[in-house]
Amino acid sequence: MKRSQDDKDAPFERRLVELQSLFELSKTLNSSLNLKSILDTLLFTPMGRMMITQGAVLLKKEEENLFSIATVKGIPANNISKDISIPDKLHEPQLLADISHFDSFAFLQSLGMKLLCPILSNNVIVGYILLGGKITQQEFTRDELEYLASFANLAAPAIENSKFIRELQDVNNELDRKVQHLKTIFEIGKELNTTFDPDKIASILVYAIMGEMMTQKIAVVECNKSATPAFIISKGFDAKENLGTDNYKKAFALLAEGKKALRAGDLPDKKLSGYLQSFGVKILVPMFRQDELSACILIGERLNRASYRNDELEFLSTLGNAAMVSLENARLFQETLEKQRLEEELSIAREIQRKLLPDAVPQIAGYEFAGMNNSHSQVGGDYFDYIQIDEKQLAITIADVSGKGVPAALLMANIQASLHAIIHTEWTLSEKVARINNIIHANTNMDKFITFFVAIIDLDKNELTYVNAGHNPPMLFPRGCADEKVRLLEAGGLILGMMKNMPYEQETIALQPGDLLILFTDGVSEAMNEKDEEFEEFRIEKSIRKHIDKSAEQLMFCLEKDVKEFTGSAPQSDDITILTVRFTNSNV
């Protein structure tokens, strides 16, 4: 009778032992926040209890019916992280043989799995325990299945908590990385801003990325639309590689469109992806200047062959744009220095040019002279002069050098020096001009030339001998009368500097009291208004006739005023130079 009672008490005692075991396992599971430790306990405990050598734990992913292998025992470790599709309606432990076929049924059987047990949290499946067959070849008992279900459900809160802690740790780690990245960007930014040398900025950027990303292959490539892409700096990449190929152009176009760093392996164009990776390119980082792709950073594989995380791509993009700002500041600084240097040179050239022009008009009895030069730019190409040859002869000249700026000023200095050297010789005026032409031709290119007019006034005979080398014909108003026909002084020859050994014709005119001579450059006749209309010679003549009774100086300023009124708000497009001569009295 006593033995029979023991037999009755045996299941109760076994159940009590199981409950105590589950209680202890629950404390063990909940005492740890390490997911791997919890999963290993979840797997190894039933395997040891039931003498099983193969098993795995699956955890639920965000996608419906999709689970991922989190840990394994007795099966190849390369199965970890593989995705398994299982219906989420299996809420009790079941033998695979008793379940209808599903997507991953054959795969799980190939791994030797026999039993599938859900891990439930609030009646929601968070994972599965997979077990192989027993070593003893025995079937799973009902008590074992109940124990396994209870054990799995006790583990669910621990799994949920550990996943939450892991997610929190991941968020904290992500935050720590971003803070570190910001600190790094700040420190590198400070270093980048210590110099305005573009090469040094590129070098700082490259070595900073090499240290942060642990790579030995990096290059900065200039990829403006207007130029063929070229290496600014290269470490580990072949600097002779042709970056102008269609493949690189496609890659740069993708960067310009996406405006963020890209993995070469993630490019949708697999041919392009393979091409870039064949040259060791793993990451492409855009560098923008005013929303336009200006440069690109090519980064190779890491020394530890680890992949680049998304937060690292964001870091590289931010760092690349910070470096681009420094490069742009360096460029602007260099431009400012160059502009200042050029302005200083122009100021010096302007001062030299000003000294080449006459300081004062000649004071000669019986004559009035006036001259002005209003440069379009800081340094112009117009020239006029008075040269006292001797007591009886005075030379006047006006010229227009092709071009603007310093080259025109240098050519102007050349013509001034040549004229001052030759005008005092005994040659005829036409011979003097021919020799000046040869000097200009020998010292300039074909695209540089000078329109030139020179006249010598015989102060005793009151005669004017002139040569016109392609210049706007000066206007001679006989006796200063408004109704007299104007005479154009056109005798001469080809503009200076075009061809060597050119002949020039000279003409001599007897001056009469009241004769008025107006010399000007094309900055006067070609001055343009808002309607793109030119002032032209007929308006010059009209202006002079309107003010014919005024002095030479007054006439000059009246003509300038009429030109400015005509052009209105249109910008001055060329130098304005005017020279006026009036013969007042032959008896003085």
Image (cartoon, grey):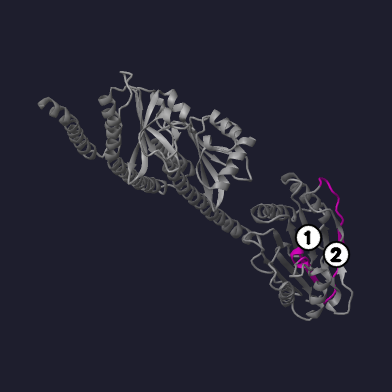
Image vertical order of residue 223 relative to residue 534, above or below: above
Crowding at dot 2, Cα within 10 Å, few <14 / some 14-19 / many 20+, comes out as: many
Residue that numbered label 1 is attached to: 454
Segment tinted magenta in the rendering: 499-526
The reply, left or right, for residue 426 in relation to residue 307 is right
The reply, left or right, for residue 352 in relation to residue 564 is left
Residue that numbered label 2 is attached to: 489
Query: Visible in this render: residue 587?
Result: no
> In front: 219, or 113?
113
Q: Is residue 566 magenta?
A: no
> In front: 484, or 583?
484
Residue furthest front in the image: 1
Q: Tell me the residue at 58%/43% (across/down).
A: 254
Image location of residue 308, percent across then percent down: 44, 37
SS for callout 1: strand
Query: Visible in this render: residue 283?
Result: yes
Q: Which quadrant of the figure has residue 20?
A: top left
Q: Which mark sits nearer the N-terminus, 1 or 2?
A: 1
Q: Which quadrant of the figure has residue 272?
A: top right
Q: Give the distance between the C-alpha atoms of the residues marked 1 and 2, in whole angstroms.
A: 11 Å
Image vertical order of residue 253 relative to residue 562, above or below: above
Image location of residue 251, percent across then percent down: 58, 39
